[in-house]
Image (spheres, grey):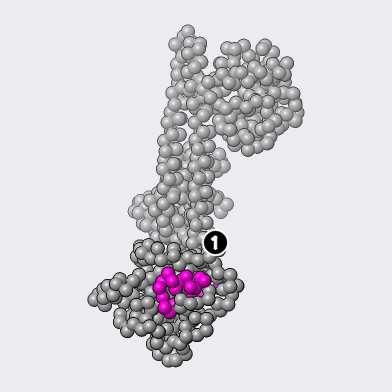
Amino acid sequence: MSGSCVLFVDDEEGLLELYRTSFTRLGYEVATASSVEAGRTRVRQGGIGLVVLDIRLGEASGLALLRELKAAQPKLPVILSTAYARYQDDFSSWLADAYVVKSSDLGELKLAVKRCLEASA
Amino acid sequence: MPREGALQRRPRGMRRGRVGTWAVEPGPPLRRHRPSRLLDLLVAVGESLERAVDPEVAAWTVLVALTAGEGLGFNRAFLLLAQDKELRGFLGIGPRNREEAFRLWADISHHQVRPMDGLHEPDPAAIAGERQRHAATLAALTVSSPHDCHAWRRAFVAHANHPQPSVRRWTEVLDSRALLVVPLLSGDEPWGVVLADNFVTAAPIYLGTVEAAETLAHVLRAAIERTGLLRRLRDEEQRGLATEHAEMLLATARSLTDALVNPLSIAGGTARELAAAPPSEPAELLPRLRVIAESISRIEEHVSRLAQGLASRANGGQRQEVELGELAERVVERFRPLALERHVRLVCYRPARRVRVAATPEAAERCVETLVANALAACQEQRGEIQVAVSEEGDWGRLQVADTGPSLETELRRAPFAGSMSMRRGSSGLGLASLRALAEAMGGKVGYDESDAGWVRFALLLRRWS
């Protein structure tokens, strides 16, 4: 997995810390961003192999960033991470490569990250 | 209702007409019902019908007028209404048989009851009871809608040999020798029928009585159409409110999911991480435990707010009529001593017209208290002014609290009712968040505005009572 930096975009600092610890321990290179703007900037800097994106980012919507990312880099895999399956209300959520409902058990998210990175390799 | 009268084989004042129908004899017209008396009756019935909001009450009012002694004096009367290609028995009034008639009339006479007096205060329970008492007869009177009723342009008196099967059935069911039939048509289709007879007293049915009964029946039709429309509107409104209620509960559930999943994921995920890879140094453990503890505190806070929100939403189904002006004055008077003490001018403006809204009284009062307390807290350092104003705004009743205190922080202006950040008032901000939750639970909303320089305005909007 080395060389595949996973960017987590979430406005919850506690979650970002959890992702950082957990995924770093699995050998991933991890980057974090706590807002849409910070996420956009980090992707532009390059080196991101996959984005895990929260849908609800304060007042902003992660779906808007998803549309932007997919327009600029169609091959960049994006996993939507959400507290509630409301993303189905918005067709743009269909652009995502995977959906994961947030949970204290990161098993599903870890599996989705692994699969998406393998598929994009 | 007539309390006496000789029974006779052939109703006096009537002659046998063609096709087995008792034709109504013209004379002596209006002998029993002088024009002034008839007019008084129509006025009394009209006044009662104006207040009626239920079709049952409207029907009962007219049937009482048909059967009361001081009314048209029929022994009994029934109303049938067209529904699903049938003329269905809707309401009946009067005794069911001779024995019951004598008992009933003796009772009325003994207690000096004047049925027409009861029109001022209809008793829905008594009406339902009367409907139940006649349920079997009403069911038996129900017939398929007659096809040839377009010939029924006027009221007529029929007997057992009437050519129309429906009419024959009614005379059979009621065992009536002279049955007044007042058809009510909608185009060529039947809308309803009023039936009345003197099955005990066999008193004659004069032309004047028939005409008066016809007039009452047409008044009844107008009233039932009006009350039926009112009921449909009311049902529609109830369905609308139920939908709103369900939507609010769904919104609450979604909000809960959003609010709880993050701290739950953080607390649970961090605990799992600790279990999977325990830190070797205590110094590494403590910050993670703190993260878990903070997340659990957030969960507790959300759950507590959710419980309050759900409770107030559940109460939202029990809204009552609340007069917003009175409520505003009451709360303002409660805060006046405190305002005086803090040298804050507190005024209340309410319109002369009552502004009635649908609300839970306790919740509405708590909302107004929150707004005034918030304004007072904002003004206390500046000796400012608070204006509480009540007004109507379309379908809404508006209670606005404006104060001359300092403006809200820029961040708070974006979402003053979010309750997630500190307020300018130095409190937690949960007061305004609760205000919004309470207002929404009552089907209302809240507003904030600082467009008028020097004034900060918060408003509570509740749906007008109808």
Which residue appears farthest toward the top when viewing the image? B280
Residue at (41%, 49%) from the top-left corner? B363
Residue A87, position as x, y percentages in the image:
62, 34
Q: Residue B47, located in which quarter of the rendered image?
A: bottom left
Quarter of the image containing the N terminus of chain A?
top right
The answer to which of B240 and B407 lies nearer the viewer is: B240
B178 within the magenta span:
yes
Residue B254 part of the magenta-drawn span: no
Protein chain holding label 1:
B
Residue B300 vs residue B143, the one in the foreground:
B143
**Residue, x 52% and y 56% (percent of image)?**
B236
Query: Does residue B209 appear in this view?
Result: yes
- The foreground one among B317 and A27 is B317
**Mark 1 burial class by Cα count in 10 Å: few <14, some 14-19, many 20+:** few
Give amino acid for label 1: Asp
Q: Give the answer, above or below, for where A49 lies relative to B392.
A: above
Which residue position holds label 1? B84
Q: Nearer the viewer, residue B97 or B223?
A: B97
Residue at image point 33% right, 71% down: B97
Residue projecting furthest to the left: B110
How many numbered marks, from 0 up?
A: 1
Q: Position of residue B421 (x, y in %)?
A: 50, 36
Tell me the SS state at disc 1: loop
Residue B381 to residue A94: above or below: below
Find residue B23 and report its horizontal and vertical position in percent: 48, 85
Indicate the quadrant containing the C terminus of chain A: top left, top right, bottom left or bottom right.
Answer: top right
What segment carries the magenta color?
Answer: B165-185
Q: Is residue B35 visible?
A: no
Q: Position of residue A76 (x, y in %)?
A: 72, 23
Residue furthest to the bottom in view is B28
